Amino acid sequence: MKKIELCTPISEENIRRLNVGDYVFLNGTIITARDLAHRRMMKYMAEKKSIPFSLEGMALYHCGPLVKAHGDEWTVLAAGPTTSMRMESFEDGIIENLGVRLIIGKGGMGEKTREAMRRYGAAYAAFTGGAAVLAAKCIKRIIDVKWLDLGLPEAVWIFEVKHFGPLIIGIDSHGRSIYEEVRAETLRRLSGIIKDVISE
């Protein structure tokens, strides 16, 4: 387990060096996207339309930030993670086609995403739920916002961040998932408990 500083754009080489349990602090650009933004990205790709932002080498944050308008400018009040599994049906296509290197969220993701990360060189990092104000403090400015018609939480926010984290690597590019490992260990222990109870 190592502490690692990453800057965007992130290379595949740097992602391949990460292992489950490493903790990361991120500098550079984070792009938020929730369900509706993922659906729109997939629709754009299917229609061969140009997406108005680049995810190549970027960190994609499953987050619907709380923002406040001040005239023509925005302030981020809170920016905690949302449940990543909601994006499971989209994320493999996003990784494969748009070059995302780091997914940030909470709760982990499934087999399709894990396989895409292994194949294309990406990783999943967990940000602590309930630490939304801490996340906002790491956001130094809003670079841009896209697709505001989806609503403030579902819009795509492009943030400049400094020392964003700690982010714990939950799925690495080698096929390991702390979520699957914990699940397997839990089932193994549960099976042992059930056998002990039955044998008494």
Image (cartoon, rainbow, N blue to C red):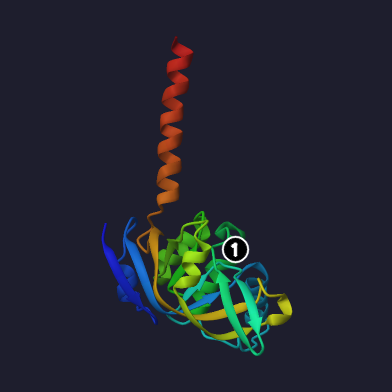
110 relative to 118 in the view: left or right? right
Amino acid at dot 1 = Met
Q: Eyeballing the image, is 160 above or below 26?
A: below
Q: Eyeballing the image, is 190 above or below 45?
A: above
Q: How many marks?
A: 1
User: Residue drawn at (59%, 72%), measured in percent from left and top?
Assistant: 33
Would residue 147 be seen by someone viewing this image from the given angle? yes
Q: Position of residue 149 (x, y in %)?
A: 73, 80
- Of residue 131 and residue 113, the one placed in the foreground of this image is 131
- Of residue 92 and residue 138, the one placed in the foreground of this image is 138
Would residue 171 be seen by someone viewing this image from the given angle? no
Q: Residues within 10 Å of mark 1 (few under 14, many from 20)?
A: many
User: Residue drawn at (41%, 24%), measured in percent from left and top?
Assistant: 192
Residue lying furthest front in this view?
70
User: Residue drawn at (34%, 56%), measured in percent from left and top?
Assistant: 20
- Image quarter in which the C terminus is found: top left
- Image quarter in which the N terminus is found: bottom left
Q: Position of residue 131 (x, y in %)?
A: 49, 60
Local SS, label 1: helix
Q: Quadrant of residue 152?
A: bottom right
Where does label 1 land, which residue?
A: 87
Q: Position of residue 113 (x, y in %)?
A: 50, 62
